Image (cartoon, rainbow, N blue to C red):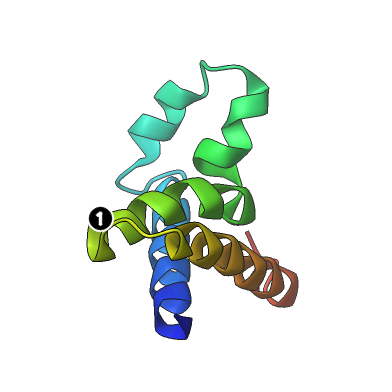
């Protein structure tokens, strides 16, 4: 389970950084900015907020459905919160 949490964390952080200005997913982020501002954080602005949503989908995609995927995604969000607090450059 721990390895799943870190794999999910790294992939969510990768997606989060890929939405930055000048990166490969930035055109999608620009398009998503049309949505209500309440949807920005879970879709592309906040790695911690993205983890439950993207993490669950990543976990199901990689390892199939099991209720553990939700727990792993939430735990990845917790680790992302620690990472963002330690390195707040973005």
Question: Residue 48: x, y in percent?
Answer: 62, 56
| Above or below, 2 relative to 55 | below
Residue position for label 1: 61
Residue 55 image-quadrant placement = bottom left
* Image position, residue 10 (x, y; %): 42, 70
Which x, y percent locates residue 63? 26, 66
**Mark 1 packing: few (<14 Cα in 10 Å), some, or many (20+)?**
few
The residue under the point 39% across, 39% down is 26
Q: Residue sitting at 59 percent across and 28 percent down? A: 39
Q: Is residue 25 left or right of residue 83?
A: left
Furthest toward the bottom, the residue is 2
Quadrant in which the N terminus appears: bottom left
Q: Secondary structure at mark 1?
A: helix
Q: Furthest residue to the front?
A: 67
Q: Quadrant of the C terminus?
A: bottom right
Q: Nearer the viewer, residue 89 or 34?
A: 34
Q: Nearer the viewer, residue 65 or 56?
A: 65
């Amino acid at each position: 389970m721990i390895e799943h949490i870190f794999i999910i964390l790294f992939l969510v952080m990768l997606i989060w950084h890929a939405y930055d200005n000048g990166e490969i997913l930035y055109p999608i982020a620009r398009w998503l900015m049309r949505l209500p501002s309440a949807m920005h954080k879970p879709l592309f602005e906040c790695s911690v907020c993205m983890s439950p949503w993207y993490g669950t989908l990543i976990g199901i995609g990689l390892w199939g459905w099991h209720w553990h995927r939700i727990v792993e995604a939430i735990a990845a969000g917790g680790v992302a919160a620690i990472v963002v607090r330690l390195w707040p450059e973005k």
